[in-house]
Amino acid sequence: MPNSSSISEFLLLALADTRQLQLLHFWLLLGIYLAALLGNGLISTAVACDHRLHSPMYFFLLNLALLDLGCISTTLPKAMANALWDTRAISYAGCVAQVFFFLFVFSAEYSILTIMSYDRYVAICKPLHYGTLLGSRACATMAAAAWGTGILYSLMHTVNTFSIPLCQGNAINQFFCEIPQILKLSCSESDYLSEAGVIYFSLSLIFGCVVLIVVSYVQIFRAVLRMPSEQGRHKAFSTCLPHIFVVSLFVSTLMFACLKPHSLSSTSLDLVVAVLYSVVPPTVNPLIYSMRNQELRDALRKLWEIPSYIRKY
């Protein structure tokens, strides 16, 4: 069997056996990818161009949209290319890059989601200190810390993963280079357990972020329920509920992917779970955030009206 030093490429999971199904998967993935690009691109453009959205909440939403674009662009284009050209191959360097960028955007996204919960906590529970605690410099520093932490974490995790000797072939049972599937190619159980320890450490960090988010929202709900105005309560909930939905989707799918029993493991189930945590959130996040946010909907409507305005003149 080949070892990691002799592997020049990996073979990803084939999504279909027949040419017709391969092309069907290509068009399906292309539609999902374009929907994610359109949704996150519109949110990014709206926040960047509309001065009414130049606030900390929308600044962090802009960061989230950019990370969502990076997340789905790391996995789907290669899967689409393989389905279109009837191949399974990804180069060793391409697999390393895919793991690095996927871990980077994922870890940075969890940091941004945690910061967004703090933003809502300050806005609702400490409104008089909002401008002081979340000024432009503080927001830029927190965003830079989230992106920087993502780079460092991803670098550490990627180096550790690909330093493990691989001698169980080069076939990865996933449509992208997923770390648990790469670990199945390790030469010994001890190598697997070494990287598995890093994974559980990562899960503990994610759990810490979840605890911070939960504590923030407990304080938020207590403050909201004490508001005398029904309109004020509705406005507070409308800015918090989308964030709760997004966090719940991310945490539930990733936790299930990492903690599901080996007895439940199968190629089909692993594929569904990977789609749930890597493809679904970047695609539906723009819809979730724009559904209950009137300011964002108005800004998006303004963007759609620009072409007709140009045609008029």
Image (cartoon, rainbow, N blue to C red):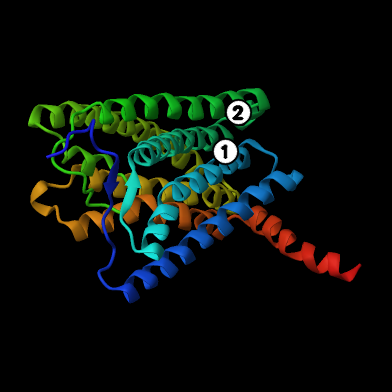
Comparing 42 with 119, the one in front is 42
Q: At 25% from the left edge and 69% from the top edge, which residue is drawn?
A: 17
| Residue 140 coordinates in the image, percent (x, y) | 61, 27
Q: Which quadrant of the structure image shows residue 111? A: top left
Q: Is residue 130 left or right of residue 79?
A: right
Q: Is residue 193 visible?
A: yes
| Residue 137 coordinates in the image, percent (x, y) | 65, 23
Tell me the number on the disc at residue 24: none
Q: Secondary structure at mark 1?
A: helix
Q: Is residue 63 left or right of residue 49?
A: left
Q: Earlier in the sequence, mark 2 or mark 1?
A: 1
| Residue 40 coordinates in the image, percent (x, y) | 56, 52
Comparing 14 with 288, the one in front is 14
Comparing 78 with 296, the one in front is 78
Q: Check whether the beta carbons of the residues at disc 2 and disc 1 lie within 8 A of each other.
A: yes
Which amino acid, mark 2? Cys
| Residue 117 coordinates in the image, percent (x, y) | 48, 37
Tell me the number on the disc at residue 60: 1
Q: Quadrant of the N terminus?
A: top left
Residue that carries the numbered disc 2 in the rendered image:
139
Q: At 40% from the left edge and 50% from the top edge, which residue is drawn?
A: 75
Label 2 to label 1, Cα distance in Å?
8 Å
How busy is the neighbourhood of tag 1: few (under 14 within 10 Å), some, or many (20 plus)?
many
Which amino acid, mark 1? Phe
Q: Is residue 177 above or below residue 202?
A: below
Q: Secondary structure at mark 2?
A: helix
Q: Is residue 173 above or below residue 131?
A: below
